Image: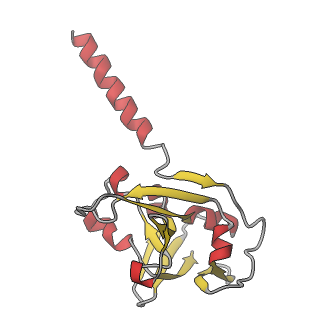
């Protein structure tokens, strides 16, 4: 009996450890810029700057060329509404596509209302932030806290709300990568 309990405990620990490695999102379609992001032809939704001084204005078309992912989650830890389904791109892919070195990287978000938040990439990376452009099948607009929102996996990772609520940047307009 004791041996079974020990085995069961070990299996539970093993499953819990493996669960943390599984992505908190689902890939809908693969994509890439295959080099420099395309010049915007539509409304600029997001400006991204890199530590070496490069700056890119991104429209919806440019963002939609990247790998498109989906995450279903609540967007507040005490939210009573059912989880929402968000679609967009991984912040990690933008970093990779722009060849931004991640050693000592800091990410600064700036929203349309001038809200600013800066965090080390090493703190953000485990949360797999998504830059969402769609919620429940509808394009986000300013009234929906869009057109770009940072989405974290509340339901899956259960991050400490006192530490992570500020990371839910809505109406995102600038991402400034810094070293």
Identified at 46% across, 63% down, the residue is 86
Question: Where is residue 18 drawn, in percent x and y?
Answer: 44, 36
Quarter location, residue 3: top left
Compared to 34, does 27 lie above or below? above
**Which quadrant is the N terminus positioned in?**
top left
Picture layout, residue 75 above or below residue 5: below
Residue at 64%, 68% (x, y): give it. Answer: 64
Q: Residue at x 39, y 86 (%)?
A: 115
Q: Position of residue 70 (x, y in %)?
A: 51, 57
Q: Hey, which residue is sitting farthest front in the picture?
A: 137
Q: Position of residue 43 (x, y in %)?
A: 62, 87
Q: Residue at x 64, y 80 (%)?
A: 59
- The answer to which of 84 and 121 lies nearer the viewer is 84
From the viewer's side, name the closer residue of 20 and 84.
Answer: 84
x%, y% of residue 37? 73, 74
Give the quadrant of residue 63. Answer: bottom right
Q: Quadrant of residue 83?
A: bottom left
Question: Is residue 141 among the parts visible in the rendering?
Answer: yes
Tell whether 83 sits left or right of 78. Answer: right
Question: In the picture, which quadrant includes the C terminus?
Answer: bottom right
Image colouring = secondary structure
Question: Taking 166 as reference, is 50 left or right?
Answer: right
Please indicate, yes or no, whether residue 100 appears anywhere in the rendered image.
no
On the picture, is 112 further left or further right than 49? left
**Identity of the residue furthest to the right in this view:** 35
């Amino acid at each position: 009996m004791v041996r079974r309990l020990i085995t069961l405990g070990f299996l539970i620990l093993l499953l819990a450890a493996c669960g943390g490695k599984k992505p908190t999102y689902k890939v809908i379609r693969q994509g890439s810029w295959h080099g420099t992001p395309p010049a915007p032809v539509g409304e600029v939704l997001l400006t991204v700057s890199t530590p070496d001084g490069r700056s890119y204005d991104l429209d919806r078309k440019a963002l939609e060329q990247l790998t498109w992912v989906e995450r279903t989650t609540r967007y507040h830890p005490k939210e009573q509404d059912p989880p929402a389904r968000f679609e967009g791109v991984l912040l990690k892919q933008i970093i990779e596509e722009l060849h931004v070195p991640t050693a000592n990287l800091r990410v600064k978000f700036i929203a349309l209302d001038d809200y600013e938040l800066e965090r080390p990439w090493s703190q953000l990376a485990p949360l797999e932030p998504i830059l969402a452009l769609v919620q429940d099948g509808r394009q986000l607009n300013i009234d929906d806290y869009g057109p770009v929102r940072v989405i974290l996996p509340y339901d899956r990772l259960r991050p400490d709300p006192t530490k992570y609520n500020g990371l839910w940047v809505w109406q995102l307009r600038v991402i400034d990568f810094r070293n």
